[in-house]
Every structure is written in structure tokens, then in C-alpha cells.
Image: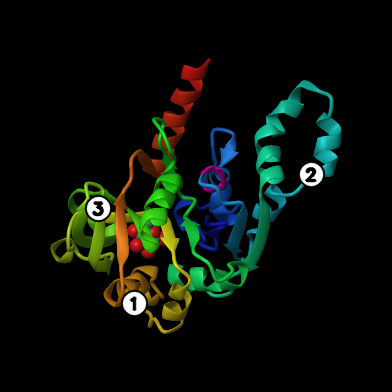
Amino acid sequence: MIQTCLFPAAGYGTRFLPATKALPKEMLPILTKPLIHYGVEEALEAGMTNMAFVTGRGKRALEDYFDISYELEHQISGTSKEGLLKDIRELMDACKFSFTRQTKMLGLGNAIHTGQNLVSNEPFGVILADDLCINENGDGIMKQMMKVFEKYRCSVVAVMEVNGDEISNYGVISGRNIEDDVLIVNNMVEKPAKEDAPSNLAIIGRYILTPDIFNILSQTEPGKNGEIQITDALMKQASDGIVLAYKFKGRRFDCGSLAGFVEATNYFYGLENAKK
Ligand code: G1P
């Protein structure tokens, strides 16, 4: 069973300035819960209880969020508002949280490598909290990936079909199907031009990685945009062994973009209203 989920959360969130000037983008709320809360819930549902965050300067609110706020709790204790903290308290009781900092913005590969000291020499999950995923009809996306991992015991990336020019915003894979929704990756390119994309299957921010990825990352040269790319490290892992791509069931909202953020807000608001 995989214990640890790593949350790279050092990025600036420039697309949400000025809101992200003083607020980590992972703390932007969809309704009343910040994005990071949904990510931790998804990891916990998959059975992970060690939540490891790679943060950076100006991200202290993430640590405070997963800590007790004595003054606030004292104030609302015994009032009708107490129930509003129920969800976060449940997460805090069920999980352990650890934090480290990425000091230079050298890319997602570097962020994951920075998290090595929080991950023991075991496979681990990675969740990019601004990709908000939900499956109303069954297991969450990380739990689905866990089942694939348990069967094949190798790194797994979540993919979805993306149309047109959009593909250039993603790591893109191509591969050979071994099940309807599982492929063995044979090519992987970070943010290719549309005409160079090996397929229309885009990687979204969910990974299960085997720990040999750290050694590969230590030897990975900067790639696209001069950053160390997890996509390049995974391509190396795929050519030396096996990496799987999994077409997940459910929905993914790109909450790193304004349109995706608004879409997620409306979708979750609809779900809340339907419950009433
Ligand atoms: C990162 C990865 C990319 C992946 C994407 C998913 O890019 O580098 O391969 O497709 O996350 O959201 P970013 O969106 O951080 O630029």
C-alpha cells in the first residue's frame, strides 16, 4: 500500500494575480474548501496518509491550513459554526503532514526531486492540486490509479484526450493498449507543438512514481522552458523499463486557468444544491 502523496505547491500562480500575490494558488477556494483540501481528500480516499508538500516562499498559509487554529476554534466552540470545521478536522485527524521548500523554480521535476526527503524509498503518489479531479460515480482518480499500480507495480500517469491546440499545454504520451484504459508508454513529450504531439493523450496532474525516479531526476537535464521536466524523467523510466498511462474515469478541471476554475466552481455548486 502506498503511504505518501507528494503535493508540489511552489508555483507562483501568476494567472490568478493579484489574488495570488498574498495567497498560495492552492488555497483558492472552490466553494468553501481550498483546492489543496480536495487534493488531500483524494489522496486519503486512495489510502495515503502521509501528505508531503513541496512549498516555497509565501506559501505558509498551506501549513497553517493543516494546523489547529486555537483562537478560532475557541471562539466558535459550542456554536452552530463549529460544524464548518468538521471536514478539515477529519483530514487533520486522519493524516500526517510534512513540508519542505523548493528554493528555485526549476520545474515540476525539480519540485518532485526536492520532495525526496519527505518520501521514503517507496512508491508514492503525486497530486497537482490545481488539477481538480472528481468521479461522482465511483472511486476517485488516485484510487483508480492505485488499483492499476497494485496490478503492475510500476509508475502510472493519468491521461485524458485533449483536442486541437490545447495539447501543447500538456505532457503528451503515446503507447500500446494492454487494457481498454491502460497503455504501456512508448513516447512522452512535454508540451509539444500540435504537429509534433505523439497522440491526443495528455498527462494530467496525477502520478504514481516508483522511487528510482529520484535517481533519474538527478541526471535529467533541463528540458522544455529550461526546466527539469518530470515528463523527461518518466520517458527515461519508460525506455529503461515500463511506465503506464491510465485513462481515468471522471472529470478533471484545470483550476490553474480562470475558465477551468469558474467551471469547477459552478459544477461543485450544482452538486451542493443537488444534495439539498
Ligand atoms: C505539468 C506537467 C505536464 C502536465 C501538466 C498537467 O505542467 O509538466 O506534463 O501535462 O502539469 O496539469 P504545468 O501545467 O505545471 O505547466
Return the residue at label 3.
166
Q: How many marks?
A: 3
Proximity of marks 3 and 1: CB atoms separated by less than 8 Å: no
Q: Is residue 183 left or right of residue 70?
A: left
| Residue type of the residue flagged with mark 2 | Ser
Which one is in front, 247 or 133? Answer: 247
Q: Residue furthest top?
A: 276
| Residue type of the residue flagged with mark 3 | Glu
| Rendered image quadrant of residue 202 | bottom left
Q: Main secondary structure of the magenta part?
A: helix
Residue depicted at x 52% and y 57%: 2
- From the viewer's perspective, is residue 137 above or below residue 16? above
For residue 223, the mark is: 1
| Residue type of the residue flagged with mark 1 | Gly
Which one is in front, 259 or 101? Answer: 101
Over which residues does the magenta segment extend? 40-45
Return the residue at label 2.
69
Residue 49 image offset from top left, x and y in percent? 61, 51
Residue 270 image offset from top left, x and y in percent? 44, 24
Whichever of callouts 1 and 2 sits on the residue coming sooner in the sequence is 2
Mark 3 near ligand 1 (CB under 8 Å)? no
Residue depicted at x 38% and y 80%: 222
**Residue 200 visible (yes or no):** yes
- Element class at badge 1: loop
Residue depicted at x 43% and y 59%: 208
**Residue 255 visible (yes or no):** no
